[in-house]
Image: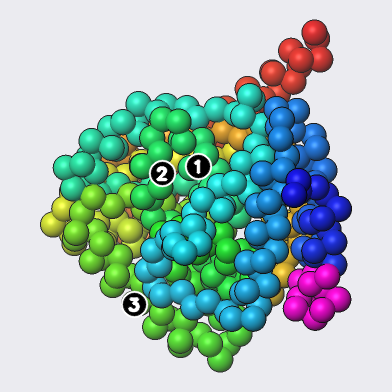
Amino acid sequence: MTMDKKITLDRLQESIVAGVLPKEIGDRLQEFFLSFHAAIASNRSLSDPSRALEALCQFLELVCEEICAPFHFEPYHQAIREPIDYYRFGLELIRPLIDFERSRALNLKHVETMNEQLQHQDNVILFANHQTEPDPQIINLMLEDTYPAFAENMIFVAGHRVISDPLAIPFSKGRNLLCIFSKKHIDTPPEQRENKLLHNKRTMSRMAELLLEGGKCIYVAPSGGRDRINAEGVIEVAPFDPQSIELFYLLAKKSSRPTHFYPLALSTYEVLPPPSSVEKTLGERRLAQCSPVQISFGSEIDMPALMDENGTDKVQKRKTRADAIWRIVNEDFHAFQNLSSRQEEEKKGL
């Protein structure tokens, strides 16, 4: 049977009427479904939308399963590939939202260097900005034709939302994750603070073990959250937390395996824009769009060289280093924005 828009919306409505989906989640899913349909309709390079709609129906099934039987994530979660391949599911749902003709993966020579380091059982840590929930899937899709194994084996540091929200969990199951509660959410609700701190301690211990094994590539967003639009309507790369960067640096130093640090800049915001402000509760709106994306890898970071040698204030030294890494990512992100603006101007001039 050929999948079409009506079938996906009818199946969603049936799940809501049957009481399988709570009303709030059903409403959020309906918003996402409608925006998804509009997004793939605007994707002129998508010749056959039926594959995307099949993935959308599978998404509904997986959310319903999560509602009925919530999944528990361990501090270190490895991608589930069978009997359901959650990794492949995530790629197929996000793929039609990307305008590949106008998308770019830049400075892949650094990925080649990282690949060689990983083959020698060195570790790689990527300090990156974070813009939208499916950033892991977008990174994979942008490296699919060049370095698929590098992206597939990457480990992502994940916050509580992606392992707690029923609409995010089907994607999260398909990724390698180090699950941690960020400082923004550690005190919400207050009675769970101690358990969250204990969970984080277990996650850090597991990360240290992984670094000791070697050959691991870990993505971390030192901002602890997604980039958002400011009051002027401009996307801002969120500041990097010095303590977060210091934590990963210290863990790497304790490992007997060499660890290499690289910056990664992402421009993915328009695919699934985050809310305008950080939300403490689950159930945020998700409105999909078809959009070009850009990713850019920077050259290896000399971590000791970024420390301010003047003075003895450790707090200030760590802030100096975090700000320096943020500037690298921020400059690459704004290079994307400037390039996109020029392309739009050239397009209008044709």
Q: What residue is pinned by disc 1?
A: 139
Residue type at tag 3: Arg
Q: Position of residue 151 (x, y in %)?
A: 41, 44
Residue placed furthest toward the front: 1
Instruction: Give the magenta part as a residue range.
Output: 14-26
| Dot 2: element | helix
Q: Based on the displayed image, in which of its 4 quarters is residue 333 positioned?
A: top right
Q: Based on the displayed image, in which of its 4 quarters is residue 211 positioned?
A: bottom left
Residue type at tag 2: Ala
As drawn, the label of residue 202 is 3
| Dot 3: element | helix
Q: Nearer the viewer, mark 1 or mark 3?
A: 1
Q: What residue is pinned by disc 2?
A: 151
**Label 1, residues with CA under 10 Å away: few <14, some 14-19, many ≥20:** many
Cα separation between marks 2 and 1: 7 Å
Residue type at tag 1: Ile
Q: Residue at x 35, y 77 (%)?
A: 201
Residue placed furthest toward the bottom: 191
Do we see residue 187 in this rendering? yes
| Dot 1: element | helix
Asked if the residue at tag 1 contacts the one at tag 2, i.e. Cβ–Cβ closer than 8 Å, the answer is yes
* Viewer-nearest residue: 196 or 232: 196
Q: Residue at x 56, y 53 (%)?
A: 89
Q: Position of residue 137 (x, y in %)?
A: 53, 48
